[in-house]
Image (cartoon, coloured by chain):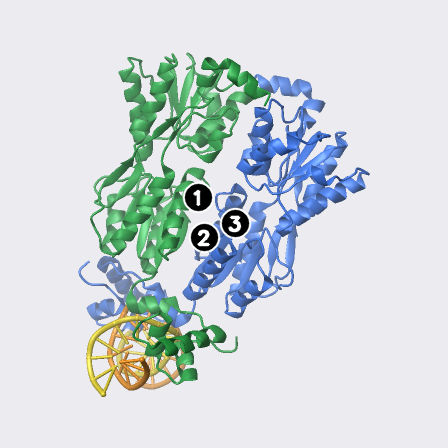
Chain colours: A blue, B green, C yellow, D orange
DNA sequence: CTGAAAGCGCTTACAG
DNA sequence: CTGAAAGCGCTTACAG
């Protein structure tokens, strides 16, 4: 590549102006069909590369949408991201990903970068402790924000997440209906809306069932597979050991089930376990995981839609939208073992 | 935010020129200490946002590094990405992530976007079927490329990956040493260097051990947990069923072990299984997974280092670098069960 | 249907 | 130590 090819290179080669070339490359009907073809052909053969920075400087649109979540390695976010990506791809937006790992400084650095690059919008699952002011700063600098999975009080931006309180109560109700009276909850904490709402659902469902809630049965913290595994020891040390456990997420539940198995206990038989999210793995794990489908793909799709609508100037979508959760009953809660022992045994030989 | 604050806004407010303001904000020693402080203070209070597009248009440096891998949801890549991110953060580069899902068109769209944004460099784990010409196109347009995990023949760019051939042979040798004679391989295919090299290691190790290699024992394809699970049926249908299986990756192995358990077979006891990558989960799964540590964090770190070195004009790092793999012996290969039955039984009660 | 000209917000020689 | 001026590569009224 001897010399950089730019609009004027093409214009000069064809004896046209840069204005015409610019219009032609963007398929403007103002340019005659034949001219347009000549221009496109020349662009192709000369190896022209569109300079988005220059265009963006001029138009103050960048075609970039930033997406920032706690961890892209978490399949829960992975599934949301996949549907956001599908949606944005269709709209010809470039989507720039980032993990914040619940580090506020990291999240701020990313938001700042998006502002500096003139991103068109931001989809954010806010880090623990994100103040409303951070969101407002972005909004005030023409960076419209849409929240996912976690929401923040006092900001008027669209937000999409599962109905965590309802979802967790579905899991507890299910365990209660199977006869469990001592039900623990493992994982999550009060630092995020997700943690708060799921714990609220847990406590409310227990109260509704007339069961007592005991602080020592609330093992807060774990958020991934490994910490779910590590929580097993604390669980096994409990004086009056619960017979069932609702976990903050599928990852926590899967880790916890590994821990139980390692301790010689059979999840789904000795201890009933439920997860949350219904990630792909839940259907094939051993035992398969009873969980709450959290509508990841709907969250992603609708968040992307809402953002795209705002980019078009349509500000009608607003406030927090709760996606309806759905209980998925599988083996880990014991339902299958208790209620269809024959079926399960024949499956074992499949 | 009534009006956008730019350099000239600050310059006007303080009665200075934009040149001075520009230099001051970038800590140039050319600007007097006191002036610099006044300028920074004004920038802070006025809510100035640096316009990277404008700067980048002028300097043709963007501070952006693109990173594109098959799937960010795969923990193998997740671990590589984490170490790349650490390294690039330190160098004050913005890192833009992308999945290509082995879709060549998607990868090309991303590379194109990076070219258009004037990215400084690209770290790529190339999609299946990526021609050398694609890499060359980027390089010729001043976008230096570093390859990770998978490499491509005939391009002179730095590449970092595990020694897949050696690693897989370590796994096979281990199974052979435990007395296995019928060893299958599940997952991966000849479309990537990883798949080819791991299969070569598998076949070579079998041959070295004087064992026959049978095409029907090579179940190619699976690359993730779910397809590993699905491969179980094909495996169980094999006429002379192998007693051991080396899997293309930990995810495949973990899915396959789920499948075995569901079919009533005990991985590590009835069938020996090994994985590849030594992802975090391998140490806590049930059974824990014998696998080959593939040096993800070293791959990520060295790839980022190599790219940063090239950005500084240092072109000494070149060619493919193989990271030395290491066998991690755990329960799934049966070693533990066979050799320390007592220890394992006491663990069961821990 | 096509062109000349201004301007997006920076940085960089160059001058003083 | 600070300023005036040019220019990065586009797009957008405006004119013809």
Q: Chain of mark 3?
A: A
Q: Chain of mark 2?
A: A
How many numbered dots are placed on residues in this image? 3
- As measured in the structure, the alpha-carbon distance from the residue carrying label 1 to the one carrying label 2 is 10 Å
Disc ID at residue B183: none
Q: Is residue B270 visible in the rendered structure shown here?
A: no
Respond whether the residues carrying marks 1 and 2 are from the same subunit. no
Respond whether the residues carrying marks 3 and 2 are from the same subunit. yes
Callout 1–callout 3 Cβ contact below 8 Å: no
Question: Residue, x 50% and y 69% (percent of image)?
Answer: A141
**Which numbered mark, 3 or 2, is in the foreground of this view?**
3
- For label 1, count other residues whose C-alpha is less than 10 Å away and answer few (under 14), some (14-19) or many (20+): many
Which of the marked residues, 3 or 2, is nearer the chain's N terminus?
Answer: 3
Q: Position of residue B95 (x, y in %)?
A: 39, 54
Q: Is residue B193 visible in the rendered structure shown here?
A: yes
Q: Nearer the viewer, residue B248 or B112?
A: B248
Q: Position of residue B23 (x, y in %)?
A: 33, 73
The residue wearing badge 1 is B72
Disc ID at residue A70: 3
The residue wearing badge 2 is A97
- As measured in the structure, the alpha-carbon distance from the residue carrying label 3 to the one carrying label 2 is 11 Å
């Amino acid at each position: 590549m001897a010399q950089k090819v730019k609009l004027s290179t093409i214009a000069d080669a064809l004896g046209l102006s840069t204005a015409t070339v610019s219009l032609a490359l963007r398929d403007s009907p103002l340019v005659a069909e034949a001219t347009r073809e000549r221009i496109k052909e020349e662009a192709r053969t000369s190896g022209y590369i569109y300079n988005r920075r220059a265009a963006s400087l001029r138009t103050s649109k960048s075609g970039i949408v930033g997406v920032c979540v706690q961890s892209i390695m978490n399949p829960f976010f992975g599934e949301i991201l996949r549907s956001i990506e599908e949606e944005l791809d269709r709209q010809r937006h470039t989507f720039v990903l980032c993990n914040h790992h619940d580090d506020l400084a990291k999240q701020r650095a990313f938001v700042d970068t998006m502002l500096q690059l003139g991103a068109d919008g931001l989809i954010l699952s806010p880090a623990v402790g994100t103040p409303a002011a951070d969101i407002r700063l972005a909004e005030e600098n023409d960076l419209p924000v849409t929240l996912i999975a976690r929401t923040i009080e006092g900001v008027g931006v669209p937000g999409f997440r599962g109905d965590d309180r309802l979802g967790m109560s579905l899991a507890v109700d299910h365990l209660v209906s199977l006869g469990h009276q001592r039900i623990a909850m493992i994982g999550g904490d009060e630092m995020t809306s997700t943690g708060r709402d799921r714990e609220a659902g847990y406590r409310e469902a227990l109260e509704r069932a007339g069961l007592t809630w005991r602080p020592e049965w609330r093992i807060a913290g774990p958020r991934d597979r490994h910490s779910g595994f590590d929580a097993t020891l604390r669980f096994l040390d409990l004086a009056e050991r619960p017979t069932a456990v609702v976990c903050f997420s599928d990852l926590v539940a899967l880790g916890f089930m590994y821990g139980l198995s390692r301790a010689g206990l059979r999840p789904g038989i000795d201890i009933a376990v439920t997860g949350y999210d219904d990630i792909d793995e839940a259907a094939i794990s051993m035992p398969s995981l009873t969980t709450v489908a959290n509508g990841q793909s709907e969250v992603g799709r609708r968040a992307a839609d809402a953002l795209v609508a705002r980019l078009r100037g349509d500000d009608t979508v607003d406030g927090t939208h709760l996606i309806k959760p759905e209980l998925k009953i599988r083996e880990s809660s014991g339902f299958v073992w208790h209620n269809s022992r024959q079926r399960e045994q024949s499956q074992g030989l499949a």
